[in-house]
Image (cartoon, grey):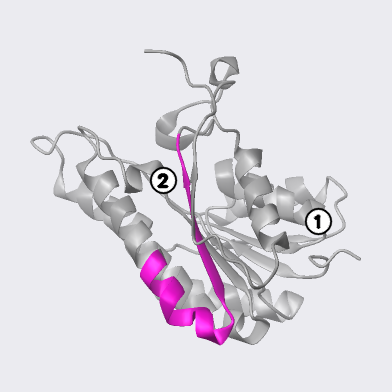
Amino acid sequence: MNALENKTAYVTGGSKGIGFSVAESLMSEGVNVVLTSRHQKAANEAADALNAKGYPARALGLEADVRNLAAQESAIALGLQEFGSIDVVVANAGVGHFAPIQSMTSQQWQDTIDINLTGVFNTVKASLPALKDSKGYLFTIASLAGTNFFAGGAAYNASKFGLVGFTQAMMLDVRQEGIKVSTIMPGSVATYFNNHTPNPSDSWKIQPEDIGQIVVDLLRLPARTLPSKVEVRPSMPPQK
């Protein structure tokens, strides 16, 4: 029997990249998915594409900006109305603005923190009651930039260092309520992030579906075991 079948996941930033691949990996295991985007059109297109693949589950696309707590609460409520429970939450939505501090604008800083850090807080706050009911699993998608700083990464590093700390502390807050929490910290992933277009030269990178597989594998672990922080690297990056 597939223990994941008929469960429901809520995935932010699910219209492309890591979010889309995580949604697809979950649907292939029979998990219904509520995927969100800042734009309803993108959310609908992603859900339609997944539903057309014939997986033993359904996808629902919703417009819900992670910067808006009320929007997250509304999307969670719609997911509960549609599927009856929220068993898995993947706080994936993120943005990257990279510039030396001398030229970084206040808007770039604010946008990065609002989406990458406050946005996850909003997703968590909106979903905790449902996860408490389901004894569910919450994932945040951080980055190796949450432990490795680099020039031009002041805003991004700050958001991801903060996200790792937030997730680990929050894990301690909620584990006695039966909620498992993990943060996944990928290195280079072949996605559209930062205006990149995936291409054959990305073959050495982590692929988005690899992150989806990690989420599924973590969900299949015994309930007594929790890898709270998972660092993921390309196994053989190009030599410098």
Q: Nearer the viewer, residue 229 or 63?
A: 229
| Mark 2 secondary-structure assignment | loop
| Label pair 1/2, CB-CB below 8 angstroms | no
8 horizontally vs 124: left or right = right
**Amino acid under disc 2:** Ser
Above or below 159: residue 102? above
Q: Residue furthest right?
A: 1
Which residue is disc 1 drawn over?
29
35 horizontally vs 181: left or right = right
Which residue is disc 2 drawn over?
143
Taking the magenta stretch, the answer to whether it contains residue 173 is: yes
Q: Tell me where residue 232 appears, x and y as whole percent.
A: 51, 41
Residue 227 in view here: yes
- Quarter of the image for residue 179 reads bottom right
Q: Tell me where residue 102 appears, x and y as whole percent.
A: 8, 36
218 horizontally vs 53: left or right = left
Q: Tell me where residue 66 appears, x and y as whole percent.
A: 43, 63
Taking the magenta stretch, the answer to whether it contains residue 61 is: no
**Dot 1: within a 10 Å radius of its alpha carbon, few (fewer than 14), some, or many (20 or more) residues?**
some
| Mark 1 secondary-structure assignment | loop
101 horizontally vs 77: left or right = left
Q: Residue furthest left?
A: 102
- Quarter of the image for residue 239 reads top left
Residue 67 in view here: no
- Quarter of the image for residue 224 reads bottom right
User: The magenta stretch spans which residues?
Assistant: 168-187
Q: Tell me the quarter of the image containing the C terminus.
A: top left
Above or below 36: residue 133? below
